[in-house]
Image (cartoon, coloured by chain):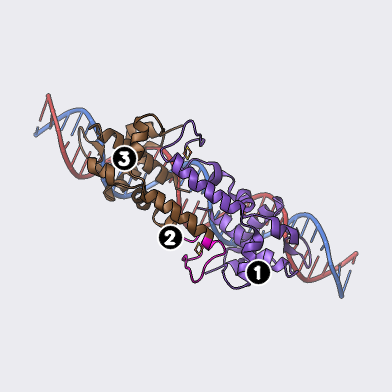
Chain colours: A purple, B brown, C red, D blue
Amino acid sequence: MFSKACEYGIKAAIFIAINSSEHRRVSPKEISEEIDSPQAFTAKILQDLVRNDIVKSVRGAHGGFEIDKDKIATTKLSQIVFAIDGDNIYKGCGLGLHTCDENHPCPVHDKFKAIREELRDMLENTSLEQLALDIKSGVSFLKI
Amino acid sequence: MFSKACEYGIKAAIFIAINSSEHRRVSPKEISEEIDSPQAFTAKILQDLVRNDIVKSVRGAHGGFEIDKDKIATTKLSQIVFAIDGDNIYKGCGLGLHTCDENHPCPVHDKFKAIREELRDMLENTSLEQLALDIKSGVSFLKI
DNA sequence: TATAAATAGGATAAATTTATCCGAAATTAA
DNA sequence: TTAATTTCGGATAAATTTATCCTATTTATA
Ligand code: FES
Ligand code: FES
């Protein structure tokens, strides 16, 4: 469904959000350990998220990654997925036709579109904050 | 969402179904032209479908691929997807945890699971026959 | 200002997916 | 039995995704 890069990106963002809410910056090393992902690859993905203004990085001693309090509340999963995987998952044809078009639909268009839109709704209505809260309270987990 | 192999496999199966319903066997060449896919790669995928007893192949002169009439009606999209992409799309964790487990859920488990199950329902309740009919009547298309 | 700590970024490698090529095996028909 | 046609299967290549490594750059602080 999502690429590995996207899975790591989502989990990393959640982990950063948790720590930022407690005023702690975190490093790629700590992040990759806590979300069980390859460190250098995760660092690349973090740079993507920085360029897309989803997380903030602070270079130099005592630096690390963080997310502003208000951004934790307003950032939606959809923004992370879009930054890393693009919009094919929201817009693309399920059977790979060049464009998904009502007027030239593939055989699964109607049924596929319905599911695709639910996925989009879900991603657009799920904030980092919600997800971070569940981790904090021990209801959900970032690895294993 | 689906792999290229799976997209080709689904479209190929639909095209074979259409032709079998008119008692015509088709070759990988004809199939790949009609669904706009690479021929040799499509041939490999057809072999997968043959091994999974989804399509039937007839070797030698006047051979080709076909699907029995009753199978056109009973074969569901889910069987094709499973044969080619496996069951990760139905069972796997959206964030890549080793197993999707109610008792050890990832942050998106509840929301993701709901969509995943709708996708599964859709695939399990969509037959080749339905899809082939829409192509025949010009309502949907296999390429471009 | 020097040093240490940290992210940024380029180059490269490994793994997987996608795609091509060619000969072997099977089947039909002349 | 031979020739023509067609799927089968192995080897290989190209493209993409995933992953690693090393150095440059930035920043805090002693
Ligand atoms: S045309 Fe294929 S999903 Fe819309
Ligand atoms: S644990 Fe992640 S989807 Fe179920």
Which label lies toward us, 2 or 1? 2
Locate residue A64, reporting x and y percent: 73, 64
Q: Which residue is the site of mark 1?
A: A30
Residue B133 in view in this figure = yes
**Label 1 lies in what chain?**
A
Does residue A106 appear left or right of residue D17 in this picture?
left
Q: Quick one: SS at disc 2?
A: helix
Q: Residue at x 62, y 72 (%)?
A: A137
Of callouts 2 and 3, which one flags the residue occurring earlier in the amino acid sequence?
A: 2
Evaluate whether label 2 is on the same chain as label 3. Answer: yes
Residue A95 in view in this figure = no
Query: Does the segment drawn in magenta span residue B97?
Result: yes
Locate residue A74, reporting x and y percent: 70, 56
Does residue B79 appear left or right of residue A119 in this picture?
left
Relative to B82, residue A104 above or below: above
Residue type highlighted by circle 1: Glu
Q: Which residue is the site of mark 3?
A: B129
**Label 2 lies in what chain?**
B
Residue B91, disc: 2
Locate residue A119, reporting x and y percent: 53, 51
Which label lies toward us, 2 or 3? 3
**Label 3 lies in what chain?**
B
**Segment colored magenta:** B91-110
Q: Quick one: SS at disc 3?
A: helix
* Magenta span: chief secondary structure: loop
For the image shown, how many numbered marks are present on the structure?
3
Q: Quick one: SS at disc 1?
A: helix
Would you say the residues marked 2 and 3 are in contact, meaning their CB atoms lie under 8 Å apart?
Answer: no
